[in-house]
Image (cartoon, helix red, strand yellow):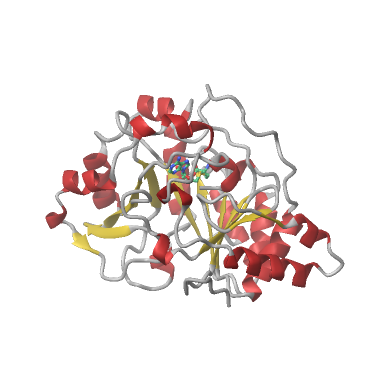
Amino acid sequence: MLIDRFGRRIDYLRISVTSKCNLHCIYCRPSDCPRSETPCEELSCDEIATVARVAGELGVSHVRLTGGEPLMRAGLEMLVRKLSAIPEIDDLSMTTNGQLLAERAAELACAGLQRVNISLDSLDAETYCSLTGGGSLERVWAGIESAQSASLRPISAQRGSGFQPDTTKINVVLVRGYNDCEIVQFAELARDRALHVRFIEVLPAGPAASQAGPLFYPAAEVLRQLRTDRLHREDRPGPGPAQVWRLGRGTVGIISSLTNPPCPSCNRLRLTSDGTLRPCLTDNTEIDLRPALAAPRPGPAIAEALREAVAAKPAQGAHLTGQWTGGPAMCRVGG
Ligand code: SAM
């Protein structure tokens, strides 16, 4: 079992499977930002599966595939098959922008993917296109519908909480001046279409860090807009950093990484697409896994690196201690 210096049990590994992305979200990797990173050599599917297997033996039970855009990773279905065969991993999920999901959801579900979070920052086609640097709202909707028909659902449905049997999770990064006028509309969508909507405070990160200030919109404003007395706090909030309220057949939640950070309950490690472990999203400590993967007995070497990463987890992210200048692009780290 992996327990850090602050008594937090680490059972969740987020794996960025590629740093490539087909969108240019303004808070992540806007198209007018100079490229700050050279393309990296990605871990192979076998290497990723080896790391996940060792992590599973150490108590990791939830793996999330992210990126970049995970659907741009060649061989993703094969990777999902390998990961879903690891007995200790009982929750295998993916975060995607949904642009390429419509054609792939059924095959991914067959391969063993259990659920998806879909990023959708606006319900207006023009705003969505401008926020994402060219994304198609129609494609995301097609992706959401395919995910729902392929039964890619959130964890509450699978673990038998008896709540929201047919829902998909939608991530909305709050961006002042772009989507702060759509909060009620997103909540109505959660209520009427049995969706889980999560509003996420924007973090100053990567090449977009210097532009994030004016875009910041606090999660508390979301609750004010939604008048929380009309919402019902979920009795059994799922695992994860969100505060969650029921709304009709769906839920809305807020992830206030800056104003009410979830660090005390952090349960995660991150693996970047080029093979480094990051103990914390906003702390630049990294542990290179490549030497462990190349070791004569990779298993014990990887286990050692995972323990080292857990031991290096800070109490809270550097974005809260004034020591954060933005770090690498979220595309590399996986969000
Ligand atoms: N391409 C996929 C997607 O768009 O969902 C997965 C990768 S993306 C880096 C993972 C998550 O990080 C998305 O929900 C995205 O909106 C979020 N994200 C990216 N940059 C962020 C930032 N600066 N602040 C907050 N969330 C961010």
Evaluate whether residue 68 shows in this view: no
Q: Quadrant of residue 310?
A: bottom right
Q: Farthest residue to the front: give it.
A: 322
Q: Residue at x 25, y 47 (%)?
A: 187
Locate residue 289, reporting x and y percent.
Answer: 72, 57
Count how many numbered circles sit on residues in the image: 0
Q: Quadrant of residue 287?
A: bottom right
Q: Residue at x 83, y 59 (%)?
A: 294
Locate residue 170, reporting x and y percent.
Answer: 39, 48
Considering only vertical position in the picture, is 175 above or below 219?
above
Left or right position of 213 against 90: left
Q: Residue at x 63, y 41 (%)?
A: 19
Q: Farthest residue to the top: give it.
A: 32
Q: Farthest residue to the right: give it.
A: 296
Left or right position of 177 against 57: left
Left or right position of 216 against 100: left
Q: Residue at x 55, y 47 (%)?
A: 334
Evaluate whether residue 229 shows in this view: yes
**Viewer-proximal residue, 332 or 186?**
332
Image quadrant where one finds the N terminus: bottom right
